[in-house]
Image (spheres, rainbow, N blue to C red):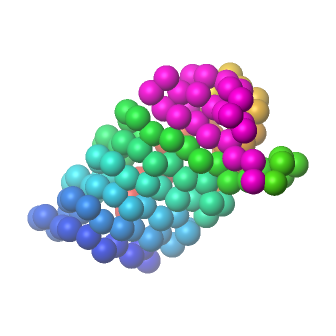
Amino acid sequence: GNEYVGRFEDDLRNGPGKLNATDGTRYDGECKANLRHGKGTLVFPSGAQYEGEWKADKQDGRGTYYFAEVTGGSPGQRFVLEYDGAVCTASGRIVATGTHEQLINESPLYRHLADLQFSTPQAGAQPAPLK
């Protein structure tokens, strides 16, 4: 099963902790009532990661997505999405702007990158809830 090391209150994850999920996803950050809440980093099995703010298990506020290298991209090239006026950049060049959901729906490049990085297709979806 999943492995969690961190603070509990009333048998619920509350405060800082680290979760290693059986699917290879790792979360290091704050929790409230068993949900990601506060600042934290979620690392996906692909190597992509999200560092930023969470509210009730959803990415909310300022944060940055780091996509792992993409097939066909330049060596070391990473695509980055910064929340809070979200900007998707490639090697320092702005590729698209918008929220995660807007980029999924409006940017074929971003949607393609998201589908490559995450295990389930992105249709404005948030990461799976903590269990």
- Look at the picture and state if 130 lies above or below 72: below
In percent of width and height, residue 79 lies at 68, 42
- 7 to the left or right of 30: left
- What range is drawn magenta here? 76-100
- 51 to the left or right of 67: left
Q: Can residue 58 be seen in this view?
A: no
Q: In terms of depth relative to the viewer, which is nearer, 19 or 16?
A: 16
- Look at the picture and state if 122 lies above or below 85: below
Residue 84 in magenta? Answer: yes
In percent of width and height, residue 59 lies at 42, 40
In percent of width and height, residue 104 lies at 64, 31
Residue, far right: 72
Query: Which quadrant is the C terminus positioned in?
Result: bottom left
Query: Which quadrant is the N terminus positioned in?
Result: bottom left
In percent of width and height, residue 68 lies at 68, 54
Residue pictured at 36% horizontal, 42% vertical: 53
- 131 to the left or right of 112: left
Residue, far left: 10
- Look at the picture and state if 107 lies above or below 77: above
Residue pictured at 48% horizontal, 32% vertical: 83
- The quadrant in which residue 130 appears is bottom left
- 115 to the left or right of 7: right
Q: Is residue 97 visible?
A: yes
Residue pictured at 71% horizontal, 29% vertical: 93
